[in-house]
Image (cartoon, rainbow, N blue to C red):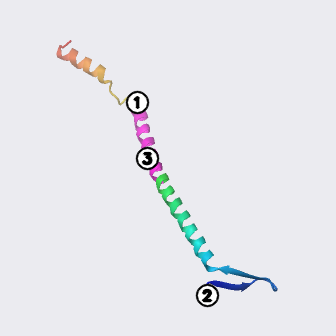
């Protein structure tokens, strides 16, 4: 028997087709799979953005703290010290 019979209030009866329930379950599983895959993509992107923000903050901190060396100037100074022009 593929149909379930039940009743609501009074003499109103309704029929639930079990194949409809299976179809609905399958649709919801596909939807869940889709959103799970999308969430995975978003989580990956979120991690990448957090990493990029960290790198940018490190660069900003280095610039603000003058931790970066101007390579062109450093080479010139080194050449002057060694007597190279």
Instruction: Verify whether residue 52 appears in magenta.
Output: yes
Secondary structure of the residue carrying tag 2 is loop
Q: Position of residue 9 (x, y in %)?
A: 80, 83
- In front here: 18 or 78? 18
Pointer 1 local density, CA inside 10 Å: few below 14, some 14–19, many at least 20: few
Which residues lie in the magenta part?
43-64
In this figure, which residue is indicated by the disc labeled 1? 63
Residue 48 got which mark?
3
Disc nearest the viewer among 2 and 1: 2
Asked where in the image residue 77 lies, by quadrant, the reply is top left
| Nearer to us in this view, 51 or 83 | 51
Mark 2 packing: few (<14 Cα in 10 Å), some, or many (20+)?
few
What number is the disc on residue 37?
A: none
Rendered position, 43 above or below 24: above
Find residue 50 and report its horizontal and vertical position in percent: 45, 46
14, above or below 27, in the image: below
Above/below status of 19 relative to 57: below
């Amino acid at each position: 028997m593929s149909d379930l019979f039940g009743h609501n209030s009074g003499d109103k009866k309704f029929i639930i087709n079990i194949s409809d329930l299976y179809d609905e379950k399958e649709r919801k599983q596909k939807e869940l799979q889709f959103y799970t895959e999308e969430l995975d993509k978003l989580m990956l992107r979120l991690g990448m953005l957090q990493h990029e923000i960290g790198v940018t903050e490190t660069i900003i901190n280095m610039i603000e703290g003058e931790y970066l060396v101007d390579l062109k100037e450093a080479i010139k100074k080194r050449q002057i010290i060694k007597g190279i022009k």
